[in-house]
Image (cartoon, rainbow, N blue to C red):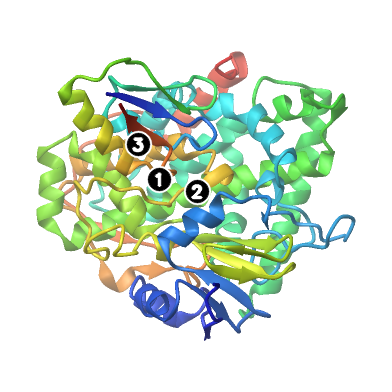
Amino acid sequence: MSQPRVEVEFDQHAEAYRASYPAQAHELREQCPVAWSTRHGGFWVVTGHEQLSALSKRPDLLSNDHDPAGDRNGYDGISIPARGTTRGGFIEMDPPEQSEYRRILNPFLSPSAVQRWEPLIADFTGACIDEVIEDGRLDFVDDLANVVPAVLTMAMLGLPLADWVVYCEPAHMQVYTPPDSPNFDTMVELTMQMHQRLAEYVQIRKREPRPGMISALLDARVMGEPLPDADVAGTVSLLIGGGFDTTTSLLAGSLDWLDAHEGDRARLVEDADLLNLATEEFLRHFTPAQGGGRTVTQDCEVAGFEFSEGDRVFMSYAMCNHDPSVFPEPDDVVLDRFPNPHAAFGLGVHRCIGSNLARLGFKHMLRKVLRRMPDYRVDRAGRVQYESIGVINGYQHLPATFTPGAREGAPLAEVMEGWQARLDAEPYESSD
Amino acid sequence: MRVVVDPELCQGHTLCNMVAPDIFQLRDDDGHAYVVVDELTAAQEELAQKAAVGCPERAITVTE
C-alpha cells in the first residue's frame, strides 16, 4: 500500500527555511518524509534518510536529465524551479552517458590523485593568511575561503590561475540568488557570459592541448564519437560551480560554528586526528550542497510512495542529514560522531566527484586558521549568509579579528606567478 | 568472519577507509573501496561492523 499524498508549502529558497535551518526539516519529516510541496509548480520534497537512500538507488526512475531544447524528454534537470537554457554538464545527465564523463574525470579526482595538489593548497592558504596576518582582521570568505578553492579549480582545469576572480562572483551569485530576486536576471546574464567564456576556452584547448581535465574530455571518445562541445563546456562550468562554492561554504560554516563553540575549537587544536571525523560532521550538519532536483521517468512506486511520470522531486540531502532515526541529536554538532553515513556529497551514482578534493582543501585551510589565528573572533555584525541557502548553504561575508602575527611566506601575487610558471612548465596529469 | 564491499553499491564515499584503513583500501582510478583482508580478527570484525553502519550507501556486509 502506498502512502496518501501529504501537501505542504515548502520552499528551499525562502527566508523561513534559511532562518530556521535545520529545524524546518523536522516539521516537514513529521508531516511526511516524502511530501508534496505546492510551490514552484509542485514537487516532492524528500526529508527522510531511508526514503532518500531508496530513491538514490534508482537513477532509472529518477532522472537528472536537463533537456531545455526538448530533444529527448524536455526534463528540467537538477534545479527547482528550472533555470538556464543550457545543460549543466554531467550532473544533468543520466547513466550511461553520465558514467562516461565520470570515467574520464575520476582519475583526476580520486583520493590518490588529489594528494598531488596539497603543495598548491598549502602555498595559497599560507599566502592568503600572510596577506592579512599583520592586520589582525580579515573576511574569511573574501580573503581565504573564496580564494583557495577557486585557484585550485583553475589549476586543475588548466585555466589561468589569475582568472579565478572572473568566475568568482558569477559562481557565487548563481547559487545565492533566489528565483524571485530582482537580481535574478543579472545573475542569469552573468552566468551566460561565464558559460560563453568557458566555451571559448574549450575551443582554445582544442587548438592547444594541455594535460588536464579539459583536454581529457576533448580527447575522449564514446562509441567512437567525441563529446559534444556544449556538454564539455557545461561540464567545465559544473566543475567551477562545484569547486568554488562548496568548500568555501563548508569552511565558513565551520569557522562560524567554532567561533560560537570555543570548547570544540580547543578540542580540534589539541587533537589533530579529530579533524577527520569532525570534517564529516561539519559536512553533515551544514550540508553545503543542499540537495538536487530529479524528474520521475515513469509511473512507479518507490519507498512506499507513488510517483507519476514528469513529477519533480527535490532530494534534500540537508534535511535527510538531520533525520533523527539515523543521526541521534541531529541538530547538534558532535565532532567525533560515528557512524555518520551522511549524504552531504549526495548518494548513489551522482556522489560528488570532487569530494576528496573538498576534504583535502577544507582540512588544510581549517588547520592553518587554527594554528595562525587561534583566537579569532567573528564580527557578527558583518556576517552575511547567502540570501537563499536552497542551493548552497553559504556565506557572502564572515569578517573576524584576531591577534596579529608575522608573515611566513611570499606575497599572494608572487605565489600566484610562481605556481602559474610551474604549471605552465609541467602540467599535472591524471593518476593513470 | 569476512567483510565484502558490493561494487555495485559503493560510490567512493571513502568513510570505511577512514575508520579501517587496514581492511578497506581505495582504488586509484575512482576511489571506490575494496577489501584487503580475508579472515577478520576479532578486533577487525568490530571495525568492519563500524564501517558497515557508517557506509552512506550500505555497501558493506560482514558475513560468516
**Observer able to see residue A76:** yes
What chain letter is assigned to the residue under label 2? Answer: A
Residue A168 percent across, percent down from the top left:
56, 51
Mark 1 or mark 3, which is nearer the start of the sequence? 3
Amino acid identity at mark 2 = Leu
State the separation of the CA atoms marked 2 and 3.
13 Å
Amino acid identity at mark 1 = Pro
Q: Which residue is mark 1?
A: B56
Q: Quadrant of residue A327?
A: bottom left
Q: Are marks 2 and 1 in contact (CB under 8 Å)?
A: yes
Residue in the picture at 58% in, 29% down? A106
Q: Is residue B26 above or below residue B61?
A: above
Q: What is the crowding at mark 3: few (fewer than 14 residues within 10 Å), some, or many (at least 20)? A: many
**Residue B15, disc:** 3
What chain letter is assigned to the residue under label 3? Answer: B
**Residue A347, disc:** 2
Q: Is residue A320 above or below residue B32?
A: below
